[in-house]
Amino acid sequence: MMTLCYRQEIKPSDLGAILNIVQSSGFFSREEVELACELATDRLENGQQSSYQFLFAENHGQVVGYTCYGLIPATAASYDLYWIAVSENVRGKKLGKMLLQKTEEIIRGMGGKRLYAETSSRDQYTPTQRFYQNCGYIAEAVLKDFYAPGDSKIIYSKVL
């Protein structure tokens, strides 16, 4: 049984947890995995000055999922969801949905009005697309061939 605890403070040990979680999905390229770690490093090095914010879900002291989000520069109240990922061993237990809901609550509490998330149009990402749709997100735009020929970017949004 999972006993979840949430925290927003990032710790140096979270870098390894983020690396393991993102790699365990099998979805992300080496460059994407490096980017996930770079965002966490930025937050560790720059603290509150970093535009990247995190929410970690822990089960018995072990990080089992996280989100990374931030205010979109030059907007009044729009946020980007940069990452949402859960450990392979807890997938299918609604942790992603709980993490997203908690992230939305935090953003609403900071005055956020909209949250944007993006994903690939490749068949591999159909479960991700369904996840956002099931969480109340609407596909706002499709940027054709954004990542590569035949691999478009789908931008989802939700009014908070």
Image (cartoon, helix red, strand yellow):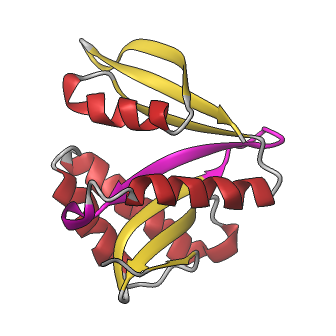
Q: In the figure, is residue 62 to the left or right of 84? A: left
Question: Does residue 52 appear anywhere in the picture?
Answer: no
Query: Measured along the vertical axis of the image, is residue 111 above or below residue 147?
Result: below
Number of marks present in the image shown: 0
Q: In the figure, is residue 26 to the left or right of 60? A: left
User: What are the residue bounds of the magenta stretch?
Assistant: 70-90
**Which is more toward the observer, 86 or 26?**
86
Furthest residue in direction bottom, as rendered = 61
- The C terminus appears in which quarter of the rendering? top right
Q: In the figure, is residue 81 to the left or right of 149? A: right
Q: Residue at x 69, y 72 (%)?
A: 48
- The N terminus appears in which quarter of the rendering? bottom left
The location of residue 21, given as percent across then percent down, is 27, 64
Quarter where residue 96 is shown: bottom left
**Which is more toward the observer, 105 or 32?**
105
Query: Measured along the vertical axis of the image, is residue 28 above or below residue 7?
Result: above
**Which is more toward the observer, 10 or 1?**
1
Quarter where residue 159 is shown: top right
The location of residue 23, given as percent across then percent down, is 20, 58
The location of residue 141, given as percent across then percent down, is 53, 16
Q: In the figure, is residue 76 to the left or right of 49? A: right
Question: Does residue 69 appear anywhere in the picture?
Answer: yes
Query: Measured along the vertical axis of the image, is residue 41 above or below residue 93?
Result: below
Q: Residue at x 46, y 35 (%)?
A: 134
Q: Residue at x 38, y 56 (%)?
A: 94
Q: Is residue 97 magenta?
A: no
Q: Residue at x 28, y 28 (%)?
A: 126
Query: Measured along the vertical axis of the image, is residue 30 above or below residue 126?
Result: below
The location of residue 144, given as percent across then percent down, is 39, 10
Quarter where residue 76 is shown: top right
